[in-house]
Each structure stands twice: as structure tokens, then as C-alpha cells.
Image (tube, rainbow, N blue to C red):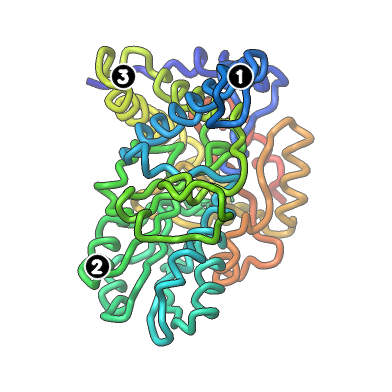
């Protein structure tokens, strides 16, 4: 049964939306609901200490970390004891690539994709260079924005140690067939590192169904604070040894977490997961948080994709607009140019009308290079669960005025 998505109710939970702007920049970071702001403030108000101490404030921090791990595990379908926190997906991917590359030998191979954000490319290329490993490239079909999974049969072989691929392009929205790609990697004995930063806010995520040995996600893309997580199997993490301080924990996942965690922000991470769970209050009521999240994110996907059709139809009907990407399965993210204006000029003209969009390559550097869009990139307008038809119509009206 389809759940009705009450976007007016959802919007009411975001204080920042009261400024009247159309926030179509969610792909670069969403706004934060009051419940997340309150959870962060409440953690500080109650008093928090460092973890592992003998007193109540320290125990509160222990509890916050444990709950944040459970929340991200519920969001992704992973195990709480396999949730590694860090400051950003980029920082965590550098950390994981350094740990993984310790096991690589000269002549080993890795596969990266031209579709990916640079954070799931450069750390691997740099780690491969240090290990003497060979880098192979999966190419995007530039006309459609698809990342054909069939090419992985050629790219992956006996020497492949790792396949890094995105669950959704942060500019074209393309959602590659990660499960098929991971299956090829696994058949060759390689690991699959999935960038879930752009996908997580838009779809129900199941790391097992994706075949992701590692799944990276950033809470600031899904209504949370600036904290990121990598979700992996605890047994796999046990096999890896990152650089770490002598007295810091050898346990998994703490072994991978450098220094002191941002405890109050982690309270915000758990609150953000609760917020996603509550987007459709009736969905799977009575079920576990994981079940309610799956129902809620299914409704989010349905709602966003209907709104995205309105956006794409509108832009597609404008002869002065060039749209990039038309993958069959995609996140609600549009990437376009208006010939005669730089992407920055378009973004500024829209900003003057209270419409927030991003301009640039958005770090999809390899893809934008292949598309001939460097150095200026294009304009990105993305939807998240708090956007509504008026946001889309204001974008369309603003871009419409740029004709001629
Ligand atoms: C798809 C994708 N991957 C990775 C990143 C990097 O994430 P972080 O800012 O947490 O390092 C981003 C950020 O925009 C992204 O959109």
C-alpha cells in the first residue's frame, strides 16, 4: 500500500526553510531538522565526558556512540559493530584505502569508475601508486550517463583486489547496478567499496543486497551533522590494521576511529536516522526501526521521483537548456548548462530569485572532464525529501527567464 508523503509536515520540521529559499542544493548538504539540532544541544546541556570513564557524563557519551552505531546500522542494513565514524567520507576513504593497500603487492589491480566523485577515486589511485598496483578504469557512457556493469567482466581478473564504485552519481544521479558489479568483484576474490554518499538520502539501503564490503555515507547529506560513516562486516574489519596510536583501542570498529569522536554530533546522527524513520509516520508502524526506515525511504524515493519528473520535464522542454545524463535508474539530481552563461552566472541569477543550486564539477572531476565540462562544470539542482512542487516551479521559472 502506497504511503502518502506529507511534504508540508516534513518542511515544517526544518527551521532553515523558513527563510523562503528554494533549497535545491541538498546534494551538497541538506538542512537539519529541529529534532537533530535539539539532540545535539541536549547532549551538551546534559553534560558529556570522554568515553570509557567512571562517571555518568562519560557513560552518556558511551551510550551516544553505541546508539549512533545502531542507528547507522539500521539505516544501511549493516552491523552496529561494523560502523566506523569519521569526519567525512573523504577522510574515511583515505583511512580505509591506506589500511587495505597494505595487503596489495606490485602487479595487483584495482578498478575505479569514471562516474564517481573524486573521493572514491583519488584515494585508491594514490594508494595503488604506493603499492605498485595497476589502476583500471570503468567508463561511463557519456550519452546516457550509465555505468555499464558488463564492462566489469573484462576489467576484473585474478589480480584484482578492490573495485570502488558509487551507488549514485552526485551529478548525473545515475544508480549503477552495484550488486552485479560487486558479484563480479567477489567472484574474483576482490572487495567492493561502495560510495553511498549520494544514494543514502534517496533510497532504502541494504548493504548486503548491494554486495558492498564497505559502504560509505555522510550524515550531512541526510539531515544530520557533518559526520561520516563506513559500514563494513566486523569480521572483515578485524583483518585490517590501520595506522593508530599505541594506547588507543585495538577493538573493531574503534580501531579505525582516530582521536576523540564528536559525541554531541553523534547524538545528532541518531536523531537524523529517527527523523528519516518518521518521515511517513504510518509506514510499517509497530515494526522495528529498520522496517520503518525501509518503508519510510521507499515512500521518500517514490515522492522524490515523482517530483523529479516534473523538474526533468520542465527543463527538458526548454530549448536553451542542455541536460546531462538520462540513466534508467537515478537519484533525483539534474545537471545542466545554459549555453552563453557560465554555470556560476546561472547559479547567481537563480540565487537572486531565492533559488539555491550548486555550480561546478561537484568533485565529479573525472566525469566532468570526460564530458568536456571542466573547469566550470555545470549547474546542479537536486531534490531531497523536504523539497516540494513550488521549489521545482521556482527553479523552472528562473531558468525559463534565462532564454535568449
Ligand atoms: C557521491 C559523493 N561521494 C563522496 C563525497 C564526499 O563526502 P565528504 O564530504 O563526506 O567527504 C560527496 C560529497 O559531496 C559525494 O557527493
Relative image position of residue 291 (x, y in whole percent): 27, 25
Q: Which mark is residue 360?
A: none
Q: Secondary structure at mark 2?
A: helix
Q: Secondary structure at mark 1?
A: helix
Q: Locate residue 325 relative to residue 294 in the image: left or right.
A: right
Question: Image quadrant of residue 394?
Answer: top right
Q: Residue at x 45, y 50 (%)?
A: 250
Relative image position of residue 366 (x, y in whole percent): 56, 68
Label 2: few (<14), some (14–19) or many (≥20) C-alpha neighbours in 10 Å: many
- Residue depth check, mark 1 versus mark 3: number of the one nearer the observer: 1
Give the Cα distance between marks 1 and 2.
44 Å
Q: Which quarter of the figure is the N terminus placed in?
A: top left
Q: Which residue is mark 1?
A: 43
Question: Image quadrant of residue 149?
Answer: bottom left
Q: Which residue is mark 2?
A: 184
Q: Are marks 2 and 3 in contact (CB under 8 Å)?
A: no
Q: Which residue is mark 3?
A: 3
Label 3: few (<14), some (14–19) or many (≥20) C-alpha neighbours in 10 Å: some
Q: Earlier in the sequence, mark 2 or mark 3?
A: 3
Q: Residue at x 53, y 53 (%)?
A: 92
Q: Residue at x 72, y 20 (%)?
A: 19
Q: Nearer the viewer, residue 207 or 148?
A: 207
Residue pushed farthest bottom? 107
Q: Secondary structure at mark 3?
A: loop
Q: Are marks 1 and 3 in contact (CB under 8 Å)?
A: no
Amino acid at each position: 500500500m502506497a504511503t502518502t508523503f506529507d511534504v508540508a509536515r516534513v518542511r515544517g520540521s526544518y527551521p532553515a526553510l523558513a527563510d523562503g529559499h528554494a533549497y535545491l542544493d541538498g546534494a551538497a548538504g541538506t538542512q537539519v531538522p529541529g529534532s537533530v539540532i535539539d539532540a545535539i544541544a541536549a547532549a551538551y546541556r546534559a553534560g558529556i565526558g570522554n568515553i570509557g570513564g567512571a562517571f555518568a557524563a562519560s557513560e552518556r557519551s558511551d551510550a551516544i556512540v553505541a546508539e549512533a552505531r545502531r542507528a547507522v546500522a539500521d539505516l544501511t542494513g549493516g552491523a552496529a559493530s561494523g560502523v566506523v565514524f569519521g569526519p567525512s567520507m573523504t577522510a574515511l576513504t583515505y583511512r580505509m584505502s591506506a589500511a587495505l593497500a597494505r595487503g596489495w603487492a606490485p602487479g595487483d589491480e584495482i578498478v575505479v569508475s569514471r562516474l564517481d566523485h573524486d573521493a572514491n577515486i583519488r584515494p585508491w589511485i594514490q594508494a595503488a601508486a604506493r603499492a605498485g598496483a595497476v589502476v583500471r578504469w570503468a567508463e561511463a557512457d557519456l550519452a546516457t550517463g550509465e555505468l555499464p556493469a558488463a564492462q566489469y567482466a573484462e576489467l576484473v581478473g585474478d589480480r584484482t583486489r578492490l573495485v570502488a564504485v558509487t551507488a549514485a552519481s552526485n551529478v548525473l544521479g545515475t544508480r549503477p547496478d552495484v550488486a552485479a558489479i560487486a558479484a563480479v568483484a567477489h567472484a574474483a576474490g576482490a572487495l567492493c567499496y561502495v560510495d553511498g554518499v549520494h544514494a543514502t538520502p534517496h533510497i532504502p539501503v541494504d548493504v548486503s543486497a548491494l554486495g558492498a564490503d564497505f559502504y560509505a555515507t555522510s550524515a550531512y547529506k541526510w539531515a544530520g551533522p557533518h559526520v561520516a560513516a563506513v559500514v563494513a562486516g566486523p569480521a572483515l574489519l578485524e583483518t585490517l590494521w590501520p595506522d593508530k596510536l599505541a594506547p588507543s583501542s585495538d577493538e573493531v570498529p574503534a580501531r579505525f576511529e582516530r582521536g576523540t569522536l564528536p559525541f554531541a554530533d553523534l547524538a545528532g546522527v541518531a536523531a537524523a536516522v529517527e527523523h528519516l524513520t518518521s518521515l511517513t509516520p504510518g509506514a510499517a508502524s509497530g515494526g522495528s526501526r529498520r522496517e520503518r526506515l525501509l518503508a519510510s525511504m521507499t515512500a521518500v524515493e517514490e515522492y522524490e521521483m515523482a517530483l523529479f519528473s516534473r523538474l526533468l520535464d520542465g527543463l527538458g522542454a526548454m530549448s536553451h537548456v542542455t541536460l546531462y545524463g538520462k540513466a534508467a535508474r537515478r537519484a533525483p539530481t539534474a545537471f545542466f548548462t545554459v549555453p552563453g552563461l557560465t554555470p556560476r552566472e546561472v547559479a547567481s541569477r537563480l540565487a537572486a530569485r531565492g533559488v539555491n543550486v550548486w555550480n561546478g564539477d561537484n568533485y565529479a572531476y573525472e566525469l566532468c572532464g570526460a564530458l568536456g565540462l571542466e573547469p566550470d562544470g555545470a549547474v546542479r539542482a537536486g531534490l531531497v525529501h523536504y523539497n516540494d512542487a513550488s521549489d521545482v516551479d521556482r527553479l523552472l521559472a528562473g531558468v525559463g527567464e534565462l532564454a535568449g
